Structure formats: structure tokens, C-alpha cells
Amino acid sequence: MSGAASALRDTATRLDATDPLRHTRDLYLPSPGLVAYLDGNSLGRPLRATAERIADLVAGAWGTRLIRSWDEQWMDLPLRLGDRIGEVCLGAAPGQTVVGDSTTVMLYKLLRAAVAAAGPQRPEIVLDTENFPTDRYVAEGIAAETGAELVWLEPDPAKGVTPDLVAGALTGRTGVVLLSHVAYKSAWIADLPEITRLAHEAGALVLWDLCHSVGVVPSDLDAHAVDLAVGCTYKFLGGGPGAPAFGYVAAHHQERLRQPIQGWMGHAEPFVMGPGYAPGAGMRGFISGTPPVLGMVGIEDTVDLIESVGLDAVRDKAARLGRFVIESVDGLLGDHGVRVVSPLDDELRGGHVTLAHPRFREVYRVLWDRDVVPDFREPDGIRLGLSPLSTSYGEVAEALVMVDEVLRAG
């Protein structure tokens, strides 16, 4: 073992021993044989409490109460759980957040509603070429459907969208600005308050994608007068594979925005089952179909955990984990030519760090075979997801040492 690897492991041991959130790692189900799991920003690990809650749901609310559980608890679950996410993770007052649908469907609903509200005098959607594919694809589909015009920003891929870049694209024709709060590749944190202010100054609405920030980076939607937001729950919120998305609509927009997927569960009187559609009041009107109860059951445990330790503490550990990775690259991986392609400034970086090297596509496959699980992002990036509640410095160190060993082995 090299001296650099030994020093890195020693540092990780010291940091784990003094980590204020070290106790939360024991709340997660163990993964026997796993050396390091660094893909929690794609799929979070399950809490022990979530496994128990799912079993209780099957045996109790579903198995015993059966259809009665809709009246007793499930009908209001999208709104109640939405309020919990809003309160703990989004800085949103009650009555503005709802859970349901996939991220793609929720994004379509809110973006389509925003385009309609902006009207034909403001046909432009401002978005960026580095955003997650779903956001770009949904916008392209809406443009084809409505005649909206796409205005593309081209940020530095290793960084992200800046206020200056957005300001240069805003005109009197801008209807909606669609951006991600944290970039899915680089982890760049966009200046949500300033970009929102600039868009409003230009008379446009803003729709923020919070998939890579919710539960790890505060967004304070109400305080910053955000119009609309969407996000997923299977990353830092621990909802599990296929867990539904959430949508946020500021209270003052709810009367004038009309989402396009008119399903029975969003009706003002769903059980009347009348001949025509009348949207429910508030966020009820942004629900479409039957809530995915099984996919929602695990979210609340993680939201409760975030509330118990404080979102600021989660954010602080995410920054410290990222700093640990960045400082380790020079000492351990610099001789290999490994590059950090995420922001070096802790204030500008979300909950992951992306490293790049020409051989990382093959290295990534070897890591998975050896039970070290990061993510790969084109063209040559290994993305280390640093979920603060479940990730130790020790497993991050083991992953970096493994990268060094694989590169040395050729």
C-alpha cells in the first residue's frame, strides 16, 4: 500500500470519528460485501425504518384495512407528504407541494401549464444544453406541441448556468426559464435567488428542477419567490426505485395555472364522477391519477431524519465530503492525470463530485466488479455521489484508493 493511500485512510478514520452525523449511517440497511456505495444521488440507500414501514403497510393498511385505507389515510397522502417535503427540504409553506407522477410527467405538467400561462406574446423557453436529458426532451416536446420557441444557453460543462448567462437570453418574449438548481454532472449550484429575480424582472416565470438538490442543498423556495419546482424522491430523500416526484406551485399561481393531464383524482369532487372536469382547489388540481402509495411510503422516514439532524448539517457534511475528495485527488490521483470537473468552491458544489480521466469508462466497470459503486457520466467522468446521511469518509477513501490501484495496474 502506498504512503498516500495509507495517509488517506488515516484521515478518513479521523474524520469519521468526529463526524457529527456518524450515527445516521447505522440507521440504514447493511449491504453485505459492498466496499463503497457512491451512487446515492441516483438511488439512495434504504433506511431500516423504511423496510419496517413497507412491511407494516402490506400487513396493515393494505392487508387489513384494504379499501378503507383510502378514506382513512391515502387520499390525502400526496398533499400531506408534499407539505412535509416542503416544510423540511424546500422552505415552502403548506399547500404548495404535492407528490405524484414521475419527474418527467410532473415536469411536463408544470412546464406545459407555465407556457400556457405565459401566452403567445411570450413564447420563449430559456433552458441550457447541459441540463438533464428529461428536462431538454420535455421542453422539446412542448415546443413541438405548442409552437413555443427554445432559447438554448451553453454553459461551461464543468461549471453551470450563471446569472450573466441567463440575463443575456432574457427578452420581452421570454415566458419560462427552466433550469436545474444543481447540475447533474458537475454539481454546480446555480444562483437560484438571483436568476429567479432576473427572470421576474423580465416578466418571466421560473421552473426549477431540484432533483439533485432536494434533501442536501437548501432551496428556500418561498423566501426567493420561486414560481414552480419539481424534483425526485429516490435520491437524497430515500423513496426507493421508482418513487414518485413532487411538484411545487407558489400559492399565488395556483388559480391561474391549469395542468394539462386532467385525471379523476385531481377533480374537485373525484367520487361524484360527473360528466366534466372541474379542477380541485389548490394543489389538489395538480394531481392526475391514483397516488402511488407503495412508492411514497419510504419518503417520510428520510424526511423525518433530515428534520431531526437539520438540513444545514446535511449540507455541511456534503461540502466536507466533497472537499475530502478534491483534496485527495492531488495527493493520490494527480500523477495519473485525474481531473476534478466539479466546482472547487464548497459554496458552488452540491452533493457529488465528478472526476475525469480518459480511461474512466473501463475503470468504472472494474470498480463495479470490485463492489465499489460510483456512477459514470459521458464522456469520461466518474461521478461520486456523496449522500451525507449514509456515506462515510472511509468508504470514499476506499473508492479513491481502488481508482488509484486500477489505474496503476493498467
Image (cartoon, grey):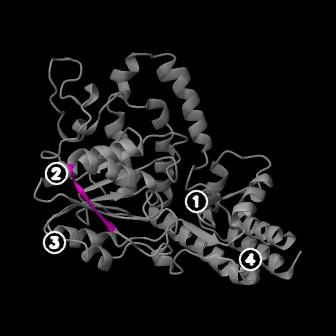
Local packing at callout 1 (Cα closer than 10 Å; few below 14, some 14-19, many 20+) is many
Q: Please report the bounds of the magenta region as a residue range.
A: 147-152
Give the residue drawn at x 67%, y 63%.
392
Tell me if residue 394 comes above or below residue 4 in the rendering: above
Give the residue drawn at x 74%, y 77%.
11
- Amino acid on which disc 4 is placed: Thr
Residue picked out by circle 4: 11
Q: Are marks 3 and 4 in contact (CB under 8 Å)?
A: no
Residue picked out by circle 1: 387
Local packing at callout 3 (Cα closer than 10 Å; few below 14, some 14-19, many 20+) is few
Give the residue drawn at x 84%, y 70%.
410
Q: Earlier in the sequence, mark 2 or mark 1?
A: 2
Residue picked out by circle 3: 201
In percent of width and height, residue 60 lies at: 51, 22
Q: Earlier in the sequence, mark 3 or mark 4?
A: 4
In the structure shown, which secondary structural element does the residue marked by tag 3 occupy?
helix
In the structure shown, which secondary structural element does the residue marked by tag 4 occupy?
helix
In the structure shown, which secondary structural element does the residue marked by tag 2 occupy?
helix
Q: Is residue 113 left or right of residue 58?
A: left
- Amino acid on which disc 3 is placed: Glu
- Amino acid on which disc 1 is placed: Ser
Give the CA separation, mark 2 to mark 1: 33 Å
Q: Earlier in the sequence, mark 4 or mark 1?
A: 4
Nearer to us: label 3 or label 4: 3
Residue picked out by circle 2: 253
Q: Are marks 2 and 3 in contact (CB under 8 Å)?
A: no
In percent of width and height, residue 279 lies at: 17, 33
Q: Are marks 2 and 1 in contact (CB under 8 Å)?
A: no
Give the CA separation, mark 4 to mark 1: 19 Å
In the structure shown, which secondary structural element does the residue marked by tag 1 occupy?
loop
